[in-house]
Amino acid sequence: MVNLSGYRGDSLKLLGEYRVSIGDPIIIETDKAIYEGILMPRYEFADDQHIVIKLKNGYNIGINIKRIKNIIKKSEKEELIPIIQLPPISLDKNLPKVSIISTGGTIASRIDYRTGGVHPALSASDLYTAIPEISKYAQIDTEILFNLYSENIEVSHWKAMAIKIAEKIKEGFQGVIITHGTDTMGYTSAALSFALINLPIPVAIVGSQRSSDRPSSDAALNLIGGVIVAAKAPFSGVYVVMHSSMNDDILAVHLGTRVRKNHTSRRDAFESIDISPAAYIKNGNIEKVLDNLPIRREDYNYQPRANFDNRVALLKFYPNFDPSIIEYLIDRGYKGIVLEGTGLGHVSNACYPALRKAIDKGLLVMMTSQCIWGRVRMTVYETGRDLLKIGVIPLEGMLPETALVKAMWVLANTNNQEDAKRLMLMNLVGEYVSRSPLERRPKDGVF
Amino acid sequence: MVNLSGYRGDSLKLLGEYRVSIGDPIIIETDKAIYEGILMPRYEFADDQHIVIKLKNGYNIGINIKRIKNIIKKSEKEELIPIIQLPPISLDKNLPKVSIISTGGTIASRIDYRTGGVHPALSASDLYTAIPEISKYAQIDTEILFNLYSENIEVSHWKAMAIKIAEKIKEGFQGVIITHGTDTMGYTSAALSFALINLPIPVAIVGSQRSSDRPSSDAALNLIGGVIVAAKAPFSGVYVVMHSSMNDDILAVHLGTRVRKNHTSRRDAFESIDISPAAYIKNGNIEKVLDNLPIRREDYNYQPRANFDNRVALLKFYPNFDPSIIEYLIDRGYKGIVLEGTGLGHVSNACYPALRKAIDKGLLVMMTSQCIWGRVRMTVYETGRDLLKIGVIPLEGMLPETALVKAMWVLANTNNQEDAKRLMLMNLVGEYVSRSPLERRPKDGVF
């Protein structure tokens, strides 16, 4: 049975003529080179001008059908020999200049065929070659900044990314894409939101929940979405661009300070919390949803504020939580503690003495909620009022993860506790949501 | 304008005859007593045989209209003087016997009129008087076990609850209700699920997100739902019974090990994660959803396993997480650590030495995901495989909160590390979900 899933128009016609099917080992002859690989499926709204094959080294490449002279289906027994000669990309000089900065993660990964595991390996320029549609939207420049699993990304990397982005602005790029592992993408998007406060251009952070070797991969579409935002968005700021549903039809553009990875594996794992996404991308077009987004502007001398202080801890409270952990952090020289309390912002009264001591010693102690949705309101119950009296700072609806990152940033920018408190309570880059959208939130679709 | 929201049938007719409206100060004369208070609204599917007023002391009571001789509307200027004489409840001796055990929380609270804050104060028997519909479903016995904000509930309280429930079984009760603060309700429901493994009857944990003094309170309906489950459910085990939507029309009966408070204030904050609720309650009837629930049975000699070891920590990982916190817990004599890692179950490689040390010293180190939905899969990426090699135990889709509580229970029941590991990996009371329902999860309803 012939399967040509995702192909349509001219490319579907061509493949039909050569009687090949997805999964077939094939040889493609073009005017300039010969390619050998497995015919791969295309995602839903791919163009009809390219055929994608997986080379033996695990990379996918897209080949323009105008250049194809012949397609040969190989016998399955025959071993595939890679014969690659990547053609130069021809670029439209009138398109916006977009920089793709690679930091690692699944979006830049390939399968290790020995173990079946996934390794970060694909370079940014390889990604570019694999997804030819990108050249419709932008002139791309690619750079590998790191090659890290995102669980290993730390404050020093946030700083390096912010500085690199400012460099790209100076060089005249109209938008920047950060490819990033999805694990800590929400933390990095918050970090860059603060480090790049008052940013003149859009920065799109993109990743992939399924490696680009799998037909179900979201890598290509997310990267295209990132390019569209970087090249075309009328707004500036830091956004996460990822699948909005299980289908390859809509991408969501999430505000960097309000986004969370809410599923370990689904392609639509990323969600805006207590607010709608800033925009959606449908059929290559940006549909803005949020008003009051900062407007894109020209400012080649933009200066980031890229320092973070890592002496801040995020502590999730639970029954029998051991207050001596708080005392340990005080002794260790911590400058801030973000509590992830229960409900409207509570911890047990057994924690009061340690919290009092922390605040006496000059630590910033802040409250968020482990409920994720909704806001802390510490005036309703006795416990909340007690904690306010002790000096715990209520962070309303700020996400715990964003609160941690913001505190790291604030405490690197001021040594004055009152200034730090004032900054924590100010809405700088959308980290606080207004009351009304709060009542919206994902709902169980079971019945 | 007359507002008689929630009243219908006979009670609506009666109130209409006396031309009173919700919020009016009124005096009601019955055959046995005189009541003064404010006429309160009723929730959506309340019966039509009772009128509810708020007494001056802040309690609500329901009065059967058959006993009402007269209703007098007071001038608003006149001060209300409480004249209370609670009538004895007449019970149908053929109804199931249900025990309501009060532990505190908003469901058993009232407003402090000086400060506007909420205090736990209402006794279980007062709750019973305020919601006369309960007598349709069960003969109720009430007992105050504690009066605690749930953020102060600890392992010793879980033990006391489990032992008390076993006592009630011995005394012949067919179902038990625990009224509980919502903050740590998910932890307690998991704890009781393990402590009451192989339970013969249903235990319904109920709470309230809005205090019973507010017209929007969910207290009455959640309590009625708890009574229905305790009295009528064909299944046994520990469940959380709370609003399923923002309306007062459907309640969800959540499996005790798969439920989470996902909003700080909404009435439908509680959600089953990666599985549907065990059942719904609509119009007073239980509609079962999950198959394979344990069946209710008679066993008056049921013995709980009520011990928990509190030397277990839940550690949420984040960028720059300080591995010395793990070493601190080792030094402090901890027996287990549940990691709330990123994505499919990762932490930074900076944590490896401390984790190795913890496992060498005999601590049980386990992995869950901070994504909440989905499961950890530690064979996909290098980091996961490294952690498996070190000896970290992957807990699949178990909720971090449930994993913490289960580890506390397992480590109180065995001193053998291998036995503990085996027990952690066994599906004892539904804490592991099968693969297929995993793909369902709450979705953003924004577009």
Image (cartoon, coloured by chain):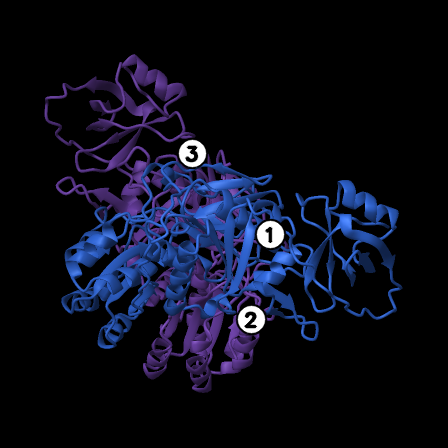
Chain colours: A blue, B purple
What secondary structure is marked by label 3? Answer: loop
- Does residue B65 lie above or below A137 as drawn? above
Question: Can residue B301 be spotted in the picture?
Answer: no
Question: Can residue A397 be spotted in the picture?
Answer: yes
Instruction: Choose between B288 and B420: the one closer to the eye.
Output: B420
Give residue A68's position: percent from left, percent from top: 80, 52
Disc 1 or 3, which lies upstream in sequence? 3
Give residue B296's position: percent from left, percent from top: 54, 53
Give residue A405's position: percent from left, percent from top: 34, 60
The answer for how far apart the CA atoms under marks 2 and 1 are is 21 Å
Q: Quadrant of residue A389?
A: bottom left
* Amino acid type at image mark 3: Asn
Tell me whether circle 2 and circle 3 mark residues in contact (CB < 8 Å).
no
Instruction: Choose between A366 and B109: the one closer to the eye.
Output: A366
* Amino acid type at image mark 1: Glu
Quick check: B114 left or right of B370?
left
Badge 3 crowding class, 10 Å Cα cut-off, few under 14, some 14 to 19, many 20 or more, is: some
Q: Which residue is mark 2?
A: B425
Quick check: A262 left or right of B108?
right
Q: Which mark is residue B247?
A: 3
> How many marks overall?
3
Quick check: B133 left or right of A42?
left
Residue located 22% across and 77% down the image: A331
Q: Quadrant of the C terminus of chain A?
A: top right
Q: Quadrant of residue B334?
A: bottom left
Q: Which mark is residue B439?
A: 1
Q: On the same chain: label 2 and label 3?
A: yes
- Does residue B257 lie above or below B67 as drawn? below
Instruction: Choose between A245 and B388: the one closer to the eye.
Output: A245
The answer for how far apart the CA atoms under marks 1 and 3 are is 26 Å
